[in-house]
Every structure is written in structure tokens, then in C-alpha cells.
Amino acid sequence: MNVLTPKPSVSAQLLHQYRLDIVGGKYPPGGQFPTVRALAYEESVNPNTMQKVLTLLEQDGLLVSQGTRGRFVTEDQNTIAEVKLLLQTEYLQSVRKSAAALGITKQQFMQFLEESEDMRI
């Protein structure tokens, strides 16, 4: 990121991170998600900001509200897989765009992937 690229808002950054955490398994399907207050404290943000993030995760279908019991990670594996695919696609398109901007050819990129296959990420 540079001075010409605006930094995403705090809520956008948190939303992205929690999406990754859920599809990556940090928060397992059916598990209770931390409360607004706990997350706001952990992330040092206003509870209203965290409420907005959790509402957006509910709209994604990744979280399910159970009233006074709290929010739980969806057990719907199709929803999790769909969001994971969207995140993967977004990431790979970003990499492709950056590689093109750097003048990296498809052949160079493929060679890099082949050579780095043995590297642990």
C-alpha cells in the first residue's frame, strides 16, 4: 500500500480479518463467536464499530444470531465455502494485477510457483 492507495477503514480491516478467521477455521462451525464488547476490547475499537462488523458477518451468512445466547459461526459449509472462494478469488486477482504492474509475465510467475513449490509458507 502506498500514499496513493487509501488505507481501508478499521471496520473493513476487521471484517476482512474475521472472514479469514472463520473460513480458515479459527472459529469452528457451530462455535460461539466472542461478544461485541470482548472483541472491541481486544481490538481497541469502539463497540459500535465492532457491532457494525458483526452485523456484516451476519449478512454474509457467516454468523448466526441466537438472541440472548449470542452469535454463532454458521454450520452451513456451503456458505463458508462460498465466502472462502470469494476471498481466494479476490486475493489471486490482486496478485495478478500487482504482477502485471511489475511487468511479471505469466511464464515468469509460473516459473516462480514451480521453483517455490518446495518452500513452506
Image (cartoon, grey):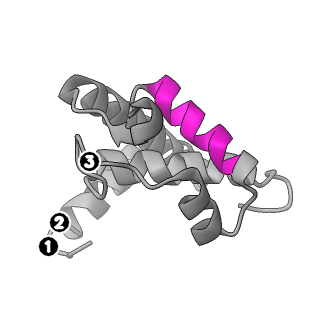
What is the x, y in percent for residue 17? Answer: 50, 54
Q: Earlier in the sequence, mark 3 or mark 2?
A: 3
In the picture, the quarter occupied by the N terminus is bottom right
| Disc 2/disc 1 C-alpha distance (Å) | 4 Å
Apparent side of residue 72 relative to residue 65 in the rendered image (left or right) = left
49 shown above or below 120? above
Near-viewer residue (69 or 76): 69
Residue position marked by numbered label 1 in the rendering: 118
- Is residue 62 among what the camera can see? yes
Q: Tell me whether the residue at label 3 lies in contact with that at label 2, contact meaning CB atoms closer than 8 angstroms.
A: no
| C-beta proximity under 8 Å, tags 2 and 1 | yes
The residue beneath circle 3 is 31
Predominant SS of the magenta segment: helix
Name the amino acid, label 2: Glu
Which residue is disc 2 drawn over?
Answer: 117
First to last magenta residue range: 49-60
